[in-house]
Image (tube, rainbow, N blue to C red):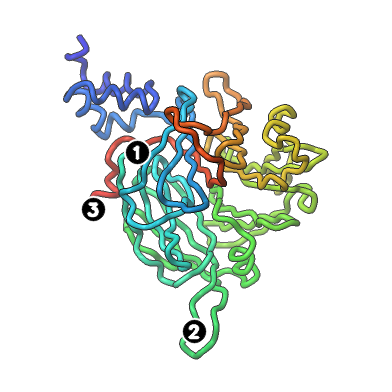
Amino acid sequence: MWSNLPFDLLANIFSYLSPDSLARAISTCKSWHTCANNSASWAALSPRNHPPWFIALPTRNPGHFIYAHNPNDDSWHLLPLDFIPNPIRPTAAIGGLILLRETTTTVLQLAICNPFTRQFRHLPKLNFTRTNPAVGVIELNSANFKVYVAGGMSGASGTGGGASYEPSLEVYDSVHKNWKTIGSMPMEFAVRLTVWTSNESVYCDGVLYWITSARAYTIMGFETGNKNWRELSVPMADRLEFAALVPRNGKLNLVGGTSDAGACIWELGESNNWRLIDRVPQELGAKLLRGKGRWGSINTRCVCIAGAMCLYRDLGSGMVVWRECAEKGKWEWHWIEGCGTIKGMKLQNFPIKGLLLHPYLASSSFFNE
């Protein structure tokens, strides 16, 4: 019976498997392998049915390995990056792909990789030479996305002047595979995007948002339709010891913490008003803090994806996860142990940069041209 199932029915069955189970299934026979690599089969896969994987890259001596946590069996895996020519740092997740920047130069040079299929490709050079700009991503799927780059320091001018802030914005379109300059911004925004903004961005309801990394926190937004810039206030902006933006159910959320109030979640509503919707459970917050007292003292970091958010500090200290449970129709809090060993091999604890992504096991057309 299994040998004679129609491809559309088999693809539907495959859609209920987690990525690691699917990988084992498609290695069973040629028929299943063909079905799983058929575009219709992969279109049937729903990331909402499976929690995302946490991907960690060391911030010291980066570019050699990825440490990946599989939530389906609560296991850690070591993925070599020997197929990538130069040392890199992760910038953002794009579906099952990772947007990277090279660390061999201070000038922004971006690339894309799939750590599971070991595919890699450089993006073209930007129209403007930029150092330390803000980067944002709008994702439709793993082959259709846009990368926005704003601000940064430009190179020295030809008239003998020094470097200056670059008040322009350009976008890379994966369909046309080129960069296009699409507008300018107030110089004040260019400075803040360069000096006080991390690479993490959130796209919500037609607006690409970045949050400043220095207190008092503020949020800058770029309206992609009319190309206007906006600024939003942040609740408890001058008191928060850390703050990060989170996409949740199509709305912009913010997570931030203080020593006395703990870590809180706010949601942006009408008239740009914030309302408190949840708090990190006290026992999980204390577990992550480990008696340090202040969220800022442990260099709290946050990574998010539609349907999940993760608070972490380093590879071995464990993580607090806030995740959508599709079956129950609500969001739930979880604790994930840190990575201390992989297959019996002990690992040293070290600072990491984390991402959340859904593994994409098919060969992406983005790398084939």
What residue is shown at x 21% (from left), y 15% (from top)?
A: 5
Q: Are marks 3 and 2 in contact (CB under 8 Å)?
A: no
Which of the marked residues, 1 or 3, is nearer the chain's N terminus?
1
Of 24 and 97, the residue lying toward us: 24
Vertical arrangement, residue 290 with respect to residue 270, above or below = above
Of the residues shown, which amino acid type is indicated by label 2? Answer: Ser
Give the mark toward the camera: 3 or 2: 2
Q: Position of residue 104 (x, y in %)?
A: 42, 63
Residue 193 vs residue 170: left or right?
right
Pointer 2 local density, CA inside 10 Å: few below 14, some 14–19, many at least 20: few
Lower position in the chain sequence, tag 3 or tag 2: 2
Cα gap from disc 1 to disc 3, whole angstroms? 19 Å
Residue corresponding to mark 2: 157
Q: Which residue is mark 3?
A: 369
Q: Quadrant of the N terminus?
A: top left
What residue do we see at 71% from left, 55% from top?
Answer: 217
Find residue 116 and name its label. Answer: 1
Q: Position of residue 311 (x, y in %)?
A: 62, 38
Q: Is residue 63 above or below residue 67?
A: below
Question: Which one is in front in this view, the residue at disc 1 or the one at disc 3?
Answer: 1
Could you tell which of marks 1 and 2 lies nearer the N-terminus? 1
Task: State how far apart marks 1 and 2 are (Cα).
Answer: 42 Å
Tag 3's secondary structure? loop
Q: Nearer the viewer, mark 1 or mark 2?
A: 1
From the viewer's side, name the closer residue of 205 and 281. 281
Can residue 331 be seen from the camera position used here? no
Q: Residue at x 67, y 42 (%)?
A: 255
Asked if the residue at tag 3 contacts the one at tag 1, i.e. Cβ–Cβ closer than 8 Å, the answer is no
